[in-house]
Image: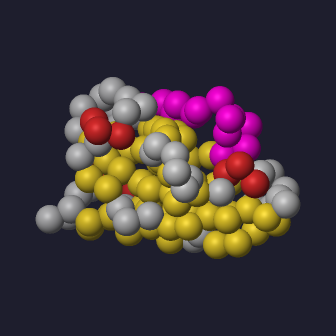
Amino acid sequence: QVQLVESGGGLVQAGGSLRLACAASGRTLSSYTLGWFRQAPGKEREFVVGINRIDDITYYTDSVKGRFTISRDNANNTIYLQMNSLKPEDTAVYYCATKSGLRVPKGPNEYEYWGRGTQVTVSS
């Protein structure tokens, strides 16, 4: 059984940083395409960044380019999302997800397994 557990969320002031982690069990993350999504209250779940399973090509949504960085720690079967220069509009519950295959889709329905999320709140 695949389980994903996010951690690292919290309350931070605008301009601050957080590093989210997504630890996996039951699946070797290095063999799968991975994504981070977020969902703000009253909004749909939104693609943030994805990483291809073969060559680690990354895809960022425009609003986080230059501020967020996804990375893998294969030894610990964990992925990270380093978030810098945070803005109030980044406030959301952040989820990690995995899928088979090479594509890195933006649609959440194409991902097979999800964590329960971690809350990120950025105050102005």
Image location (x, y in percent) of residue 122? 74, 62
Asked if residue 9 lies left or right of residue 63, the reply is: left
Image location (x, y in percent) of residue 92? 58, 57
- Compared to residue 115, the image places residue 100 above or below, namely above
Residue at x 45% of width, y 45% of height: 45
Image location (x, y in percent) of residue 41? 55, 56
Identity of the residue furthest to the left in this view:
1
* Residue 7 visible in rendering: yes
Which image quarter holds the C terminus?
Answer: bottom right
* Residue 80 visible in rendering: no
Asked if residue 113 lies left or right of residue 80, the reply is: left
Which image quarter holds the N terminus?
Answer: bottom left
Q: Which residues are magenta?
A: 55-68
Asked if residue 12 lies left or right of residue 73, the reply is: right
- Compared to residue 66, the image places residue 68 above or below, namely below
Residue at x 36% of width, y 50% of height: 97
